[in-house]
Amino acid sequence: MEQKTYIQQFYQAIFQYGPQVLAAILLLIVGLWLIRRITATFQMALQKRKVDESLRPFLTSLIDVALKVALLLMVAGQVGIQTTSFIAVFSAIAFAVGLALQGSLGNFASGVLILLFRPYRVGDLLNLDGKIGYVTEIQIFSTILTTDLGKKIIIPNGKMTEGAIINVPMGAEVQAEISLLLDSGTSLPNLREAVEAAASRCPWGLPGREPETVITGLSRDDLKTDIAWWTSGEHYLLTLDFMPEALREEFQARGIQLAKERRREGL
């Protein structure tokens, strides 16, 4: 009699919970199949957008884990398990981790944005708050610049996205500029001739792009002029370093007197 009661309870449990369990299993199977399709489509979209290769696996795994966690919660709810407590625990853990890693998460988010939207690339010359260097690495949490003296500058990505950056892209046509203070009696035709002669000697100058000489100030004793030569982004610093020496030689050959010479700050 007792055995018959257990059998009846077993059948009753099957009829009561069986449909829910079957629905949960079906939901799990279909959900996993959909997640595979979604992650594959997402990965193809990242490849088409030419997202950085180091970022693709991370973003794909992030989407995959998030979808699977959501699927498990849905399956648990289908079976009848209360998921409210699980969600509360996950929220508390996420909140605590977010507080502990607030700065790192900010740098991480900035790194993702940089790798997605590419405001600069490896090889570009950047000027950030007076820190000038070529981009050698773009990592998730930081960007590494290398100066023309071989020094490395490691800048958190949060700093790279919160302010203005002067970017000289590799391969772009840019002007290298310096400002000079000359004697006020300097002949302008003689000055422009000297600038053209010096520019023609620059091994990194762009053919067909004439140098520019602009008078920006005049006083009783001094003549202020800005001189610009066209060059490529990767040769910007080399051209900027070459200009003073070449100009000084041409000025001495033509008797042009320098009142004061200074290299323009920044780019």
Image: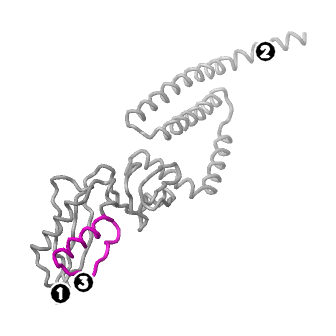
Q: Mark 3 — residue?
A: 259
Picture coordinates of residue 108, whole percent (x, y):
52, 51
In the rendered structure, find residue 10 and report the number of the disc placed on it. 2
Q: As drawn, is 85 to the left or to the right of 258? A: right
Q: Amino acid at mark 2?
A: Phe
Q: Residue furthest front?
A: 253
Up-down: is 70 above or below 256? Answer: above
Q: As drawn, is 101 to the left or to the right of 242? A: right
Looking at marks 2 and 3 on the same chain, the residue that comes earlier in the sequence is marked by: 2
Q: Mark 1 — residue?
A: 219
Q: Magenta segment range?
A: 240-267
Looking at marks 3 and 1 on the same chain, the residue that comes earlier in the sequence is marked by: 1
Q: Amino acid at mark 3?
A: Ala
Q: Nearer the viewer, mark 1 or mark 2?
A: 1
Residue that appears at 43% across and 53% down? 135
Number of marks drawn: 3
Q: Amino acid at mark 1?
A: Ser
Q: As drawn, is 135 to the left or to the right of 240? A: right
Other residues around mark 1 within 10 Å, as few (<14) / some (14–19) / many (≥20): few
Residue that appears at 29% across and 69% down? 245
The image quadrant that residue 125 belongs to is bottom left
Where disc 3 sits, the SS reads: strand
State how far apart marks 2 and 3 are (Cα): 103 Å
Quadrant including the N terminus: top right
Q: Residue furthest left?
A: 189
Picture coordinates of residue 188, whole percent (x, y):
11, 75
Decide whether residue 245 is among the magenta residues: yes
Q: Tell me, yes or no, whether the two marked residues, 3 and 1, touch with CB atoms within 8 Å.
A: no
Looking at marks 1 and 2 on the same chain, the residue that comes earlier in the sequence is marked by: 2
Q: Nearer the viewer, mark 3 or mark 1?
A: 3
